[in-house]
Image (tube, rainbow, N blue to C red):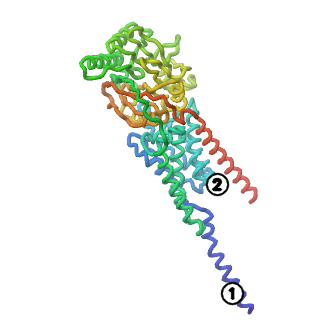
Amino acid sequence: MPRCWEEARRDRSVALKTAQEPAAAASRAGSWRVPEAPARLAASVAGGVLLYLAFPPLGWWFCAPLGVALLALALRGARPRRAAWIGYAGGLAFLLPALAWVRPIGDDAWLALVGVESLFWAALAVAAALVMRLRLWPLWVACLWVVQEWARGLFPVGGFPWARLAFSQGESPYTGFAALGGAPLVTFTVALTGALLAALVRGRPPRWRADRVVAGTFLAAIAVPVLGLIVPRPGDEGRTVRIGVIQGNVPGRGMNFLGDEPAVVLRNHADETHRMAQAVRAGTLPRPDIVVWPENSTDIDPYDSAYAREVIDSAVKDVGVPVLVGAVVKIGAENRATRGVVWDPVTGPGAYYDKRRLVPFGEYTPFKDLFLALSSRANLVGRQSVAGDRPGALRMGPVTIGAVECYEVAFDGTVRDAVLAGGTPLVVQTNNASYALTNLPPQQLAMSQLRAVEFNRAVVTAATTGISAYVGPDGRVGWRTGELVAGMNVLDVPVRTQKTVAARVGALPEWVLVLMGAGATVAAVSGAISGRRRS
């Protein structure tokens, strides 16, 4: 072969290889990337806003996986430092509106809470950016969402497990996963769908496997919520209990919801109970087996005040069945407890449940000396609450209820303890008076919907100002009140005793997902360090 032909062929080969290198590099990159910092920031903020739309009061549940997808795309290929502030921005975009219910306490408290909680999003973003370099990265990103929520539920000052992905899915195709692995598994499946959607937005893989990769990822994204619809759940057991629910309303608003005149809140709930008794005698309401008042339904300690005991006793005797009364009672000279007391029409106050998960800066002041020096509002807490030490299982009439106090419905273990102690149905006593007409009451109702499916238990909520509600074991809301109104009703509530898989295995699914996420992060960090050494 002439020498000139060989040189020409070699030159063509080199030229072809050079032309293919950019395409090969793009293929190795393997995904769509936001090239500029402003575009990454916009994608992250948009993802945070979509997550907010998934939560009540709007409750557009399908926005949650879309929000996760946008956040994942914003992080794809980002260096850890950039990922941190991009994730922090997404956290702010989500939490500022999602936690706007804190504003009645003060805008400074709202901004401080959002600022601290967004740090967890920054940490999530750094870890996610690292694990997205691994194979099967959608799986690891979904695990990291569970890690983030687990950490938020522990730190700081006892944790704040509000605004978890699972709590946007009160009634959606993902809700059924709660019966298998509780709220952590619901969060995982929502995040997995979002990560799979993000994985679809990618450069073209090698031609021989392009169709398989795209089709497999697309089918997996569809299959996850479909599987949630077919999760088996225990059936009806043919037993019911009639529960009367009292919502008495309060005279004031915001932080001054008790008003200026003492005992108004107590009288409101007692008067509403007398009206229930009259309706029963008139035949317009069935006779209840038990009655539930909300948390803080008496603003005077009934153990300390003869007047309060007389008002409560009169109402209980009139309705003629045990009443669960919500009270704040004195413990010693300086402390108090948020208590649900079973008040019998014959024997008076008896068994009780003391709230175990206390609200920081609402029921007690962590680092008291420091915060008293920084803000005079820390004095508004007054007596420091003492946490109870027993699960909320209280015998009332024909059933043992699972007592849960307000804030506690967000904590997996506290609700599970009440169920395992024999509680059925679950009764949530809550006082949302300071947050009336904000997004807190509907967010809390969505938590009750998830808990109902998670534990195969009906959930009855009694609130001072609303939303009082009944949620069936299937997670559907069967009755609810408005807000800032007095109201009452008698409900036929199913009594279920069968335990779900989630109740039996407890926190095991969460621990498995947390360890998977942590392991993937360690592997990604180790790979990055090894790569730097080789280079």
Measure the C-alpha gap from mark 1 to mark 2: 42 Å
Asked if residue 484 shows in the view, the reply is yes
Q: Is residue 326 above or below residue 416?
A: above
Q: Which residue is mark 1?
A: 8
Residue 443 seen by the camera: no
Towards the viewer: 311 or 275: 275
Q: Earlier in the sequence, mark 1 or mark 2?
A: 1
For this orientation, the residue located farthest to the top is: 306
Residue 211 image offset from top left, x and y in percent: 54, 65
Q: Is residue 488 left or right of residue 497?
A: left
Per the image, label 2 sits on a secondary structure element best described as loop
* Apparent side of residue 346 relative to residue 94 in the rendered image (left or right): left
Snapshot quadrant of residue 202? bottom right
Quarter of the picture holding the N terminus? bottom right
Q: Viewer-nearest of labels 1 and 2?
A: 2
Mark 1–mark 2 CB contact (< 8 Å) = no
What SS does tag 1 mark?
Answer: helix
Q: Residue furthest front?
A: 238
Residue at 35 percent across and 27 percent down: it is 492
Counting labels gives 2
Compared across the picture, whether 57 is left or right of 528 comes to left
Which mark identifies residue 134? 2
Give the class, few, some or many, for how many residues have Cα within 10 Å of label 1's Cα (few <14, many ≥20). Answer: few
The amino acid at mark 2 is Leu
Question: Mark 2, residues whose alpha carbon is within 10 Å: few (<14), some, or many (≥20)?
Answer: some
**Is residue 140 left or right of 57 when viewed as pictured?**
right
Q: Position of residue 404 (x, y in %)?
A: 47, 25
Three-letter amino acid code of the residue under disc 1: Ala
**Which residue is more in the foreground, 509 or 105?**
509
Quadrant where the C terminus sits is bottom right
Residue closest to the eye, 364 or 399: 399
